Amino acid sequence: MIQINTNMKLALYCLLILPVLFVLLPITPKLVASPAATSNARSASQLYAKYCVSCHGQNGKSQTPKGKSHHARDLTDAKWQDDVSDERIYNSIMNGRKVRGEMPSFSNKLSNEEADALVGRIRGLRK
Ligand code: HEC
C-alpha cells in the first residue's frame, strides 16, 4: 500500500487544479469584462447630452447662450456636412478646434469608440 500523507495530497490537488486554472485564466477577464462593458457603455445620445448640448444644443444649431459666446458652429448645416470628413469631425471632437471659435478637446473624457459614435450622431444632425 502506498501511504498518501497530507503533503502528497496537497501536491496532487495542485497538479489537478493547475490545468483548470490555465484554461480558465485567459477567458475569465472576457467573461467578467463583457457584461460590465455593456452596462458601462454610454450611447452617442447620452454622450451628446452630457458633453455637447450645452454649446451645440439638442438640435445641433448651437444657438444656446454658451454656443453663441464660443462661436460654435451650426452642425445641421448641409453645406458644412457635405464638405467635412468623418476624420475631421473625429479630430475636432478629440483635439478641439480653435479656428472660428473655441471648441474644447474631449480626448480625456471619451474613448475612441465613443468619439466614433459621436461622429455618427453629428452626421444625424444634418438638415
Ligand atoms: C464650450 C462649448 C462647446 C462644447 C461643450 C462642444 N463644442 Fe463643438 N464646437 C464648439 C465651437 C466654438 C466650435 C467651432 C470651432 C471652430 O471652428 O473653431 C465647435 C465645433 C464643433 C464641430 C465642427 C468641427 C469642425 O471641424 O468644423 C463639431 C463636429 C463639434 N463641435 C462637435 C462637438 C461634440 C460632439 C461635442 C461634445 C462631445 C462638442 N462639440 C462640445 C464649441 C463647443
Image (tube, rainbow, N blue to C red):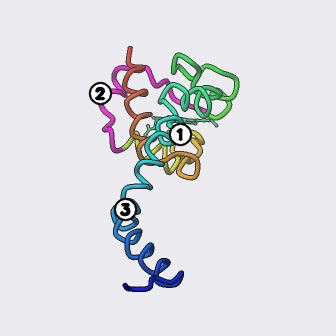
Q: Position of residue 125 (x, y in %)?
A: 42, 20
Crowding at dot 3, Cα within 10 Å, few <14 / some 14-19 / many 20+, comes out as few
Q: Position of residue 63 (x, y in %)?
A: 61, 19
Q: Position of residue 109 (x, y in %)?
A: 58, 47
Q: Quadrant of the N terminus?
A: bottom left
> Could you say which disc has been placed on residue 100 in the image?
1
Q: Residue at (43%, 43%) from the top-left corner?
A: 34
Task: Please tell me which residue lies in front, 106 or 75.
Answer: 106
Q: Residues in magenta?
A: 71-87
Q: Nearer the viewer, mark 1 or mark 2?
A: 2
Q: Nearer the viewer, mark 1 or mark 3?
A: 3
Specify which label sits upstream in the sequence, 1 or 3: 3
Specify which label sits upstream in the sequence, 2 or 3: 3
> Could you say which disc has been placed on residue 3 in the image?
none
Cα separation between marks 1 and 3:
50 Å
Reply above or below: 15 against 60.
below
Question: In the rendered structure, which amino acid carries the disc numbered 1?
Answer: Arg
Tell me: 92 left or right of 85.
Answer: right
> Could you say which disc has been placed on residue 26 in the image?
3
Reply above or below: 92 against 123.
below
Question: In the rendered structure, which amino acid carries the disc numbered 3?
Answer: Pro
The residue pinned by badge 2 equals: 82
